[in-house]
Amino acid sequence: MSNYTQLLNNLDHLKLLKFKEILPGYLDDALQKNKSFVDILKELTDKEVEFREERARLINLTISHFPYYKTIDDFDFSYQPSINKPQILDLLSLRFVEHFDNILLIGNSGVGKTHLATALGIEASSKRISTYFIHFNTLMQEFKVAASEGTVDKVVKHYLKYKLLVIYESGYLPVEKDAANGFFQLVAARYERRPKIITSSLPLSKWGEVFGDYTIANAIIDRLVHHSHIIKITGQSYRIKGKILIENDKDWPSSLTYIFDRYKTT
């Protein structure tokens, strides 16, 4: 076995996959350009580091359970003038994560709350910040089941491990008392320790109706709004905007095809 073949085997053994992939063509180019041994190793290891960081980023995005992939670049601020764009761009710096600040996005259905929450969550996940995205009703169902099984503490501990927790679409359905108590315990456990992004279709003043108990609702709200950024969005639904565009566009196709790019990891 030649030394070159042994080198490739060693790279396999060390799982230096990108290093091995680019090595053959890179060596020929490096020799022609008389690059030093140190420069060669530096450039090859740079490629390996870039490859691993990108793979880790994509894995983080996958396990974060985002409903779709949307960034702030996809958001039409001109359609929602009530939103302070500089404030949103500042939140993208993720300072709120380090300061344990919550973000509350409040507004009617379709105004872009979930889009903004997703964009902020994806930005955090891309920076290797452990992030989890969950529907409010799904979380409440988990607490309801956990209450019947005596495992509420276990559920709280599970969601406490994520540095950033994104809970979307709260306020659509009433919450049972056991689930409300579980949610309060989670909010209390993360208070001033781990930030949350929460979207709601209802103003905070009506949360008592959702939770069926104004005392619990007020205790939850008190811990959410302290150290928080409250963003109230007013305006038309983006879904209405899409409908208007389609109706006004005679060349719009009769059927739409949505293409989702899925990343594969090796």
Image: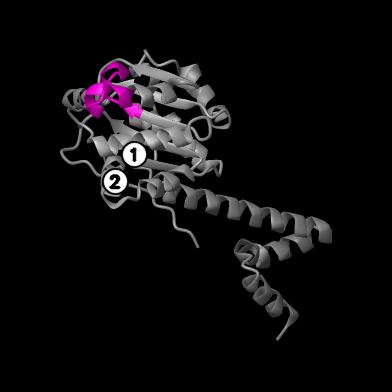
From this viewpoint, is residue 180 visible? Answer: yes
Q: Position of residue 157 (x, y in %)?
A: 44, 46
Q: Residue at x 30, y 43 (%)?
A: 143
Q: Residue at x 42, y 19 (%)?
A: 230
The residue indicated by pointer 1 is 182
Is 254 drawn above or below residue 104 in the view shown? below
Residue 63, compared with residue 241, is above or below; it is below
Which residue is nearer to you in this view: 141 or 69?
141
Q: Is residue 11 left or right of residue 152?
A: right
Amino acid type for the residue under numbered disc 2: Ala
Quarter assignment of residue 5:
bottom right
In which quadrant is the N terminus drawn? Answer: bottom right
Mark 1 crowd level (few <14, some 14–19, many ≥20, 10 Å Cα): many
The span from disc 2 to disc 1 (Cα, nearest Å) is 8 Å
What segment is highlighted magenta in the picture? 199-217
Image x and y of residue 210, in percent: 23, 27
In the image, residue 204 lies in the stretch drawn in magenta: yes
Residue matched to label 2: 147
Secondary structure mostly seen in magenta is helix
Tell me the SS state at disc 1: helix
Residues 260 and 106: in front is 106
Query: Along the horizontal axis of the image, is 71 left or right of 240?
Result: right
